[in-house]
Amino acid sequence: MNGRSLALLLLLAVTGLIVLIATDRLLAGRIDAERQTADERALLDLLPPGSYDNHPLAHPIALPASELLGIPAPTQAWLATREGTPVAVLLPATAKGYKGPIRLLLAIRPDGRLLATKVLGHRETPGIGDRIEPSRSAWLQVFTDASLANHPEAEWRVKADKGQFDQIAGATITSRAVVSATQHALQFFDGHRPLLLGGTSP
């Protein structure tokens, strides 16, 4: 192979490398954008479309570890606003379920009323405890509009324990765990309003 052929091969290799790097950077940006969009859908689908105009995930609120949230390490929440006015706080919480932790996300209005709740992950019994999932039942809707103000402390129990909230048939332990975690998350919200609604540091 003569010098001219080697130079041509080297030029082709360098050109291919440049194209590969450029393509990788282009795709990486697109993949990151798609991942962020998927994350936003997963977390922000609790909020009614058009109810906010900011990008809550772009500015998370650092939270301290809290027994009320059931999260033993620092975590984060997100504030949704419209025209600069808070419309909802997205607050994570963890319940102690029958078979392990139940990871929850709550959307709470500034006045402390619960807008919506979803399950992010759990290991509850298939066919029974997994009915906490919205795709399996509408049970989580029992918490819509619930707050510490409109439900005294004694009411934050399932009806089997003489409380206010229905339980999932056959999954009383799971139901109790979610009711308790929801109450505690609302208590955390109530005690940390300036942090959650104003974005100040803890």
Image: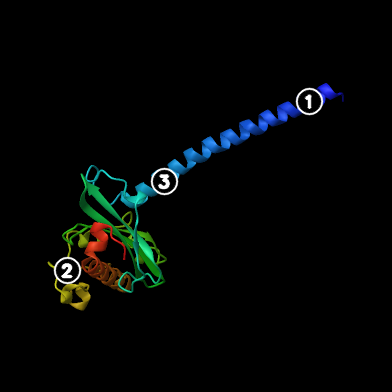
Q: Quadrant of residue 14?
A: top right
Percent position (x, y) of residue 145?
17, 59
* Number of the label disc, if any, that sits on residue 148: 2
Label 3 element class: helix
Mark 1 or mark 2: name the one nearer the start of the chain.
1
- Mark 3 vs mark 2, CA separation in Å: 33 Å
90 left or right, relative to 1: left
Percent position (x, y) of residue 9?
77, 27
- Mark 1 vs mark 3, CA separation in Å: 43 Å
* Number of the label disc, if any, that sits on residue 56: none
Q: Residue at x 52, y 37 (%)?
A: 27
Kindly identify which residue carries mark 1. 7
Please name the amino acid that badge 3 sits on. Answer: Gln
Q: Crowding at label 2, few (<14), some or many (≥20) Cα neighbours within 10 Å? A: some
Q: How many marks?
A: 3
Mark 1 or mark 3: name the one nearer the start of the chain.
1
- Of badges 1 and 3, the one in the foreground is 1
Q: Residue at x 35, y 55 (%)?
A: 60
- Mark 1 vs mark 2, CA separation in Å: 76 Å
Percent position (x, y) of residue 170?
31, 70
Please name the amino acid that badge 1 sits on. Answer: Ala
* Residue 13 in the image: above or below residue 91: above
* Residue 193 in the image: above or below residue 67: above
Q: Residue at x 22, y 72 (%)?
A: 158
Q: Quadrant of the C terminus?
A: bottom left
Kindly identify which residue carries mark 3. 36
Do tag 3 and tag 2 residues touch (Cβ < 8 Å)? Answer: no
Taking depth in this image into account, of 150 and 192 the one nearest to the observer is 192
84 left or right, relative to 30: left
Q: Quadrant of the N terminus?
A: top right
Please name the amino acid that badge 2 sits on. Answer: Leu
